[in-house]
Amino acid sequence: MAQVVPSSDSQWHTVTIRIPFLTAEHATIAKRVIDVDRELQPHVVKRTLEVEGETLVCTFETFTVRLARLTTNAFLENVDLVIRTIGEFGDEAAAYSTSK
């Protein structure tokens, strides 16, 4: 099957999501966890993750609006899991790492 790749930047759809965290450390943890998983179709989905203070900023550039929706949904599911994990284990993990 032939792949259609956009020929110019004007054909890409851009979505930027800003997720506030309680601390810059939590935002950095989320970035590191999510950054491990690469996009499955890098020729039609480009993702950049940055931490700005206590905020995780993710920008997606996708070839279609449908890909923007699917990619955003998957990203938000990952963020939800990270937030719940930090909420459940964050204090214990911090206490454990400082006691060593």
Image (cartoon, grey):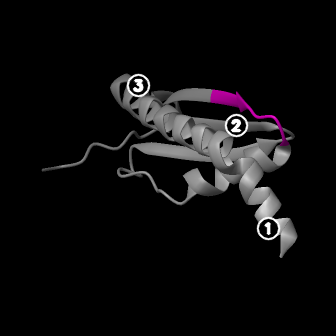
Which numbered disc flags the more N-terminal residue, 3 or 2? 2
19 in magenta: yes
Which residue is found at the position 34% from the left and 44% from the top? 5
Marks 1/3: CA distance? 38 Å
Most foreground residue, 68 or 3: 68
Q: Secondary structure at mark 3?
A: helix
Instruction: Give, as a single range, the part of the protein colored magenta.
Output: 17-23
Q: Position of residue 4 (x, y in %)?
A: 27, 42
Query: What amino acid type is highlighted by mark number 3?
Result: Arg
Marks 2/1: CA distance? 27 Å
Which numbered disc flags the more N-terminal residue, 1 or 3? 3
- Residue 62 in view in this figure: no
Residue identifier under label 1? 97
Most foreground residue, 46 or 3: 46
Residue identifier under label 3? 69
Q: Secondary structure at mark 1?
A: helix
Most foreground residue, 29 or 8: 29
Query: What amino acid type is highlighted by mark number 2?
Result: Val
Which residue is found at the position 56% from the left and 38% from the top? 79
Q: Position of residue 73 (x, y in %)?
A: 43, 29
Residue 52 falls left or right of residue 4: right
Quarter occupied by the C terminus: bottom right
Q: Residues within 10 Å of mark 3 (few under 14, many from 20)?
A: few
Which residue is found at the position 44% from the left and 43% from the top? 45
Q: Residues within 10 Å of mark 1 (few under 14, many from 20)?
A: few
Residue identifier under label 2? 57
Query: What amino acid type is highlighted by mark number 1?
Result: Ser
Determine whether label 1 and label 3 are within 8 Å by CB.
Answer: no
- Residue 73 in view in this figure: yes
Q: Position of residue 17 (x, y in %)?
A: 63, 28
Residue 6's place in the image compared with 17, above or below, is below
